[in-house]
Amino acid sequence: MKIDIRRKNALNLIKDKSKFSNFDEYPVLKEDVDPQLHISRNGVDQPFFLVCQKDCTIAALTGKARVHFHDASVRYYDLLPGDHVYVPAGMPHRITAIEPGVHIRYKAREAGLEAVAWYCGNCDHEIDRYTWDTAKQVPQAGYLAGAERFNGTSERRICKSCGHEHSPLDLSPFRWADIAGTLA
């Protein structure tokens, strides 16, 4: 399904929020704008930690969320409407929804490498990671490829440190294939 959202420089993101869905990370400004704004309407938890090669900032327009950081001195930040959270390059981070909301990610137009990673809920050891170059693969295709790979075999979901097997991800709340098809 092709998503029909025009990229433009003047937006009413609150009025247009119904066009967006869970972790779409849809770029909304014209392609030559840097930094680029990526919008999502999130009502579920992000199913992975995202790792960006370059710095980014997450802003909350509505709702309440928590941004979790892995291997950082700050473990999480509660995100309320109007809040902005700076995420340093290379920092694994994950957004969990407390109340459904609209979030914007400010990201470099040429974002470089990105990765999705999973950590063990028992011992915090990294279980799996999928990395791609955003110049060759749009982020949504990377999210989907990484999640499908994680789901593809139980070996990818077993922690090599403590042996705990993690459940496959429910990908039904996400439309990354549609977004990737629209952006490609």
Image: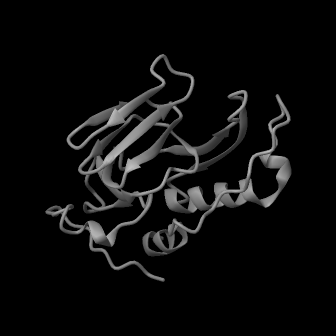
> Number of callouts in the render?
0
Q: Going by the picture, which residue comes out furthest to the bottom?
A: 1
Q: Position of residue 105 (x, y in %)?
A: 34, 47
- Closest to the observer, 143 or 158: 158
User: With 12 as the anchor, is 68 left or right in this view?
Assistant: right
Residue 27 placement: quadrant: bottom left
- Closest to the observer, 32 or 43: 43
Q: Is residue 107 visible?
A: no
* Residue at the image position 84 percent from the left and 34 percent from the top: 160
* Residue at the image position 45 percent from the left and 43 percent from the top: 95
User: With 65 as the anchor, is 149 left or right in this view?
Assistant: right
- Closest to the observer, 27 or 44: 44
- Closest to the observer, 5 or 75: 75
* Residue 41 versus residue 179 in the image, above or below: above
User: With 177 as the anchor, is 22 left or right in this view?
Assistant: left
* Residue at the image position 48 percent from the left and 83 percent from the top: 1
Q: Position of residue 20 (x, y in %)?
A: 35, 67
* Residue at the image position 28 percent from the left and 45 percent from the top: 60
Residue 177 placement: quadrant: bottom right
* Residue 77 versus residue 137 in the image, above or below: above
Q: Position of residue 83 (x, y in %)?
A: 24, 37
Q: Is residue 78 visible?
A: yes
Q: Position of residue 178 (x, y in %)?
A: 50, 74
Picture colour scheme: one colour
